[in-house]
Image (cartoon, coloured by chain):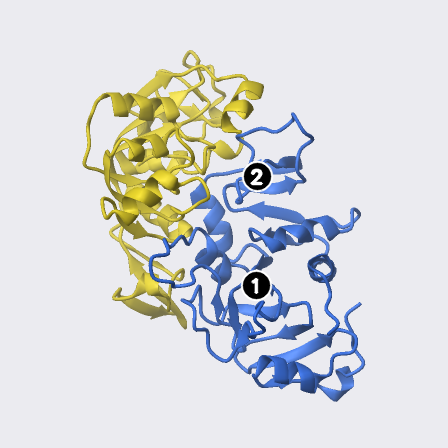
Amino acid sequence: MIGGFGTAGMPDELIDALIARRVGNLTLISNNAGNGESGVAALIREGRVRRVICSFPRQPDSHHFDARYRDGEIELELVPQGNLAARIEAAGAGLGAIFTPTGYGTILAEGKETREIDGRPYVLEYPIRADFALIKAHRGDRWGNLTYRKSARNFGPIMAMAATTTIAQVAEVVPLGGIDPETVVTPGIFVQRLVQVPAIPNAELADLVA
Amino acid sequence: MNRISRDQIAARVAKDIPEGAYVNLGIGLPTKIADYLPGDREVVLHSENGVLGMGPAPMKDAEDPELINAGKQPVTLLAGGAFFHHGDSFAMMRGGHIDICVLGAFQVSIYGDLANWHTGEPGAIPAVGGAMDLAIGAKRTFVMMELLTRSGESKLVDRCSYPLTALGCVTRVYTDLAVLDVGALGARAVELVDGLSIEELRRLTGVPIGWEAVASDRRSP
């Protein structure tokens, strides 16, 4: 699992480290299938991904995914974004399955079990869990408590709960007690590794994104 | 034929968004609606990547790559706004907490079925994003679109030929030629643009459309 919505919340440095480890044949669970050249796009460009579970792979700058998908090198499971989130949450919460109204009557629910509950139709969907989650947060402490920054939060908190080993990169590591307990977004029990990656000043980051 | 512009459609949709509403404006055409919400009307915009109280685009050089909308464009946050994760964000949609969602469409059926995510063309890479969740989640789902394709085919249809986004989810369709209500009982015109008769609208779309005589003097601005 890799967090991020577009480039917001994408743990680029953790992905670079993963690429350097030369592991491949990966199943990638992420909202998108890469934008531009960094992050998930780089992982796909390097040929490390065999299967993608995501909601929105095709974008103007998803050329690395597009090429490998068309060549048949990557298998795609397309999941509506809310179902992706709900299935990840189900995994983190230890649920066996969920009934969701999203997708009912569409080709994405073909062949799946359905049930009418209180007069409304639902589709049975199973949890999505992972061996590893790579996420980007903003501040963290030695116990793994995390806060996030703006809309970079996106999938971080729910992916952290759904992986056996969650590795979070943070801009700042603070001492225990340095995060107001009332503002902890991800409690440390869901985080196994913390890596400090100092933030790039916004102006520079904007240049890189552009 | 007289048609209203995309901006005029956006302004028309904005007229129907009440004070205090929680609203999600879909990617593309519907984002224009925000420009036509009067400044004195408090409407809270939801963006499914995890923002409530979304404000307009930032000034140049004030963009923050970690503050974006569902279309991945930089935005701002109004005072009172909030950030949350994807689980909560889609609970807001799926759980029926959002009052109005406005979406674009390839096709809408007179019964409110929506097709707006995939043309189904062989070789096209499908991408669905939040379209299916948005369509079924809000208390009311509006569609904003041009009524006819460039080649003159009606996008209001008896039955969608493109892959469905959701069944029976759309309640109202705003177009460049008419505003229509759709649903289990079929389509009913609410407003026609100046110079368009209901007979002509029926001929252009080829689908049955109800029209109450009492409403016959209603015209889009």
Quadrant of image for the N terminus of chain A: top left
Circle 1: residue type: Thr
B166 lies above or below A158: below
At horizontal 75% and vertical 88% (from top left) the residue drawn is B213
Could you tell me residue B72's position as x and y percent?
53, 40
Q: With A52 as the anchor, is B109 left or right in this view?
A: right
Which label lies toward us, 2 or 1?
Answer: 2
Q: Colour of chain B?
A: blue
Say which residue label 1 marks.
B141
Q: CA distance from mark 2 to mark 1?
A: 23 Å
Could you tell me residue A197's position as x and y percent?
40, 16
Circle 2: residue type: Gln
Q: Give the camera-side residue of A201 and B16.
A: A201
Number of residues whose C-alpha sits closer than 10 Å to that of mark 2, classed few (under 14), some (14–19) or many (20 or more): few
Q: With B81 as the anchor, is A189 left or right in this view?
A: left
- Residue B73: which disc? 2
**Residues behind callouts 2 and 1 on a single chain:** yes
Label located before the other in sequence (2 or 1): 2
Which secondary structure, mark 1? strand
Q: Is residue B160 visible?
A: yes
Could you tell me residue A95's position as x and y percent?
27, 49
Q: Is residue B94 visible?
A: no
At horizontal 72% and vertical 56% (from top left) the residue drawn is B7
Q: Which chain is yellow?
A: A
At horizontal 46% and vertical 52% (from top left) the residue drawn is B130
B19 lies above or below B47: below
Q: Chain of mark 1?
A: B
